[in-house]
Image: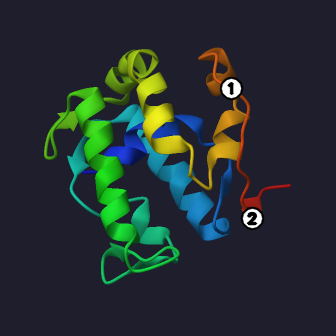
C-alpha cells in the first residue's frame, strides 16, 4: 500500500511538475496519481516520495545538512496536527482535499516561509484560489520544459 508522510499530505496539493531532478519528478507524479485513486496510509519518516530523492541517505533526509531530518519530522507533525490525522491511519485523498481550505493559512504561516518550494507552490492556481500572498523566496529547481 502507498505510504505518505505528514508534510507531503499538504505540499503535494501544489505539485506542478518541478523537483530536484527528472527521476524525482516522475516518481512524484506517479505517487500523486496513485494517492488520488486509492487509499494510502500515513507514514512516519521517509515515504514513497522520499525513495526517489537524491537527498535520502540511510532513510533520512540529508538536504542541506544533517539536521534536516528533525526539521522535516517537525513539518510532518505540524501537518498531522492541523489535519487531525495520526501516523498509521489509512485515508483517501478526497479527505485531504476537503480539509485543505481550513488548514492552509496555518500551514502557510508556520511551514512555508523558509521553504525552497515557496515560489513554485505560490504560483499554482490552487494557492491563488486560497487567496494567498505572492512568493518571497526562490530556489534552483528542475523545471520541465
> Between residues 21 and 85, which one lies in front from this camera angle?
85
74 to the left or right of 109: left
Q: Are marks 1 and 2 in contact (CB under 8 Å)?
A: no
Res 33 seen here: no
- On the image, the x and y values in percent for residue 108 come to 50, 33
Point 33% across, 74% down: residue = 60
As displayed, is residue 135 above or below residue 23?
A: above
**Residue 22 lies in what quarter of the image?**
bottom right
Q: CA distance from mark 1 to mark 2?
A: 21 Å
127 to the left or right of 37: right
- On the image, the x and y values in percent for residue 119 come to 71, 44
Q: Quadrant of the C terminus?
A: bottom right
Q: In the displayed image of the protein, which residue is found farthest to the bottom? A: 58
Frontmost of labels 1 and 2 is 1
The residue at which mark 1 appears reads as 133
The residue at which mark 2 appears reads as 140
Q: Label 2: how many residues lie within 10 Å, few (<14), some (14-19) or many (20+)?
A: few
Amino acid at each position: 500500500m502507498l505510504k505518505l508522510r505528514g508534510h507531503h499530505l499538504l505540499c503535494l496539493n501544489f505539485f506542478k511538475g518541478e523537483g530536484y531532478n527528472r527521476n524525482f519528478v516522475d516518481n512524484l507524479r506517479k505517487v500523486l496519481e496513485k494517492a488520488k485513486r486509492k487509499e494510502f496510509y500515513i507514514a512516519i519518516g521517509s515515504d514513497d516520495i522520499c525513495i526517489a530523492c537524491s537527498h535520502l541517505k540511510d532513510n533520512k533526509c540529508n538536504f542541506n545538512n544533517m539536521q534536516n531530518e528533525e526539521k522535516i519530522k517537525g513539518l510532518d507533525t505540524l501537518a498531522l496536527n492541523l489535519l487531525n490525522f495520526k501516523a498509521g491511519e489509512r485515508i483517501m485523498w478526497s479527505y485531504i482535499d476537503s480539509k485543505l481550505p481550513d488548514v492552509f493559512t496555518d500551514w502557510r504561516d508556520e511551514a512555508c516561509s523558509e521553504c525552497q518550494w515557496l515560489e513554485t507552490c505560490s504560483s499554482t492556481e490552487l494557492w491563488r484560489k486560497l487567496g494567498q500572498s505572492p512568493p518571497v523566496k526562490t530556489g534552483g529547481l528542475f523545471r520541465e520544459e
